[in-house]
Image (cartoon, rainbow, N blue to C red):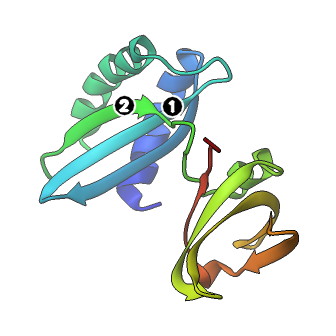
Amino acid sequence: MNQIEKTVWDLAQPVVTDAGLELWDVEYVTEAGQRYLRVYLDSPDGVDLDACERVSRAMDPILDEADPVPDSYIFEVSSAGCERALKRPSDFARFIGSSVEVRLYSAVDGAKQWIGALSAYEDGAVTIRANGGERRFEKKQIASVRLHMDM
């Protein structure tokens, strides 16, 4: 998490908690030449558009006052989604046993994408149960890990 994301996380946390929601992630990215500041929400009951709008409206004046982003940006608030990225150790602990998609920087046994049940997470290494066995991927191999919804 970069400094802008950390600052926005700290600003958003009390707003999101007051709304009865969980702060899942904050990202500050550039896409197609435009900067985006995104706040992702979660809740056991789901996150609807009204919840996103409430948090967005509450965050606008806070971001204006704190001014944590030096450039112009588009601010978005949304649900973390059912195929959310897992990033922090607490994310992995919460979803042990769940189906995940592991994307790798380089192919392992001919595949850069692996889907299986998350069975362990240790110091950035991810272990999944797939194809009748377990497969461990080291942190340096992993581009991303997301929840995977079987269709």
Q: Measuring 48% from the left and 41% from the top, which residue is drawn there? A: 10
Q: Measuring 58% from the left and 80% from the top, which residue is drawn there? A: 111
Q: Is residue 142 left or right of residue 77?
A: right
**Residue 125 rendering spot, x and y as whole percentages:** 73, 75
Kind of residue sitting beneath label 2 = Val
Residue that mark 2 sits on: 77
Q: Quick one: label 2 or label 1, which is nearer the N terminus?
A: 1
| CA distance separating discs 2 and 1 | 7 Å
Please say whether residue 126 is visible from this viewpoint. Answer: yes
**Residue 38 rendering spot, x and y as whole percentages:** 35, 41
Give the answer, above or below, for where 61 lies relative to 2. above
Disc 2, SS: strand
Quadrant in which residue 119 is drawn: bottom right
**Residue 121 rendering spot, x and y as whole percentages:** 79, 65
Q: Measuring 55% from the left and 86% from the top, which residue is drawn there? A: 107
Q: Is residue 149 left or right of residue 32?
A: right
Residue that mark 1 sits on: 41
**Residue 7 rendering spot, x and y as whole percentages:** 41, 47
Asked if the residue under mark 1 is in contact with the one under mark 2, i.e. CB atoms within 8 Å, the reply is yes
Using a 10 Å C-alpha cutoff, classify the residue at mark 2 as few (fewer than 14 neighbours), some (14 to 19) or many (20 or more).
Answer: many
Q: Measuring 72% from the left and 58% from the top, which residue is drawn there? A: 89
Kind of residue sitting beneath label 1 = Leu
Of residues 80 and 89, the one nearer the viewer is: 80
Give the answer, above or below, for where 42 lies relative to 138. above
